[in-house]
Amino acid sequence: MKRLLFIALSILSWSFASAQATHSVMSCNIRITGLPADEVDGRRWDDRKDICLKVIKSRKPDIICMQEVIYESYAYMKKKLSGYMAFGFEGPEMDPWTEGYHLIGKNVIFFKKSRYELISEGCYWLSETPTIGGSSSWETSRARHCNWVRLRDRKTGKVFRVLDTHLDHINAQAKTRQTEVIVAESAQYAADFPQLLFGDFNSGIKDEPYALLTAAGWQDVYEAVHGHEETGFTAHGWKFDRKKGRRIDFIYTRGGVQALESEIVKDAPSGIYPSDHYFLWAKVQF
């Protein structure tokens, strides 16, 4: 009887821990470094990098999905985020441009090594040939991709998936077709399997990518917490006097993930913004 009681209490304790475990997550477009337009005070990477790190660390994230990461910023973040494992930077450089704005900015996923066990990882390209590195279709301005990791929470044993992407910034058809690739790839997992999708979608809640994702069962975390209203821009482009804008950066969830909190992070320590995008932070629970 004592043994049975111990087993029952252990199961209840594990179930309670699983139910209560939360995950602090961020999506951060950190802006490609070295752009001529940024050669002004407050925009250079050397001006922003410590601010960028400070804003990220202030939210104590378990998982960070970054976009527009290139060599200089990757080396800095990997060194400073020493308690995290990084995936998604290394790989073939198949874009015909190797510097400036045309360089493929990688979508890098950072996650706490103490909290999560890496089960598997991968990358596919948002094109008609997703297994071919650097491939592009639909007149996209440059090759785009999606990185993903499958993790096990060491606290609860729960397995889930994290995806990080960045859609085309010009061509509407390309954005739609790229979203269709993500929707189709993620649909191979059971409807109740937890997945988190982060990224810069270069489109808003009234555009086709949003409609495609929500129709496929993805939930906008910010909307789940704050309601379905346009709240203003997430990509400020260093222009803060604009009266209107739209969210183009999103965190989506699928598969029984509950959104507990969500914030557009507008911190500017010492008057310096970490990027031309506001970062996103959320707390979720499976």
Image (cartoon, grey):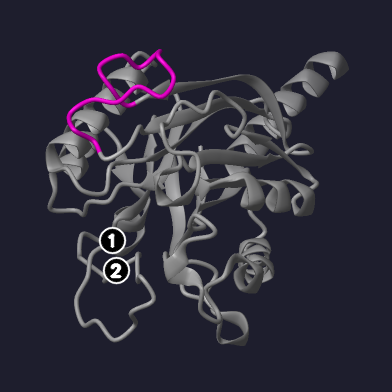
Q: Name the outermost residue toward the right.
A: 2
Left or right: 73 as drawn, with respect to 128: right
Q: Residue at x 68, y 24 (%)?
A: 118
Span of residues in magenta? 126-140
Q: Residue at x 17, y 43 (%)?
A: 171
Q: Mark 1 sits on what residue?
A: 247
What's under tag 1, amino acid-wise? Arg
Whether 216 is drawn above or below 109: the answer is above
Quadrant of the rendered image containing residue 15: top right
Instruction: Determine which of the numbered discs, if any, sits on residue 36 in the image.
Output: none
Quadrant of the rendered image containing residue 116: top right
Is residue 7 among the parts visible in the rendering? yes
Quadrant of the rendered image containing residue 219: top left
Q: Secondary structure at mark 2?
A: loop
Q: Residue at x 45, y 42 (%)?
A: 103
Residues at discs 1 and 2 in contact (Cβ within 8 Å): yes
Q: How many marks?
A: 2
* Main secondary structure along the magenta-highlighted residues: loop
Is the residue marked by circle 1 packed among few (<14), some (14-19), or many (20+) residues within 10 Å?
Answer: many
Judging depth in this view, the residue of 197 and 102 nearest the camera is 102
What's under tag 2, amino acid-wise? Phe
Q: Secondary structure at mark 1?
A: loop
Q: Residue at x 28, y 42 (%)?
A: 168
Instruction: Determine which of the numbered discs, if any, sits on residue 233 in the image.
Output: 2
Is residue 62 among the parts visible in the rendering? no
Whether 94 is drawn above or below 165: the answer is above
Judging depth in this view, the residue of 31 and 229 nearest the camera is 31
Say which label, 1 or 2, has the lower sequence index: 2
The location of residue 248, given as percent across then percent down, is 29, 56
Is the residue marked by circle 2 packed among few (<14), some (14-19), or many (20+) residues within 10 Å?
Answer: many
The location of residue 35, given as percent across then percent down, is 47, 61
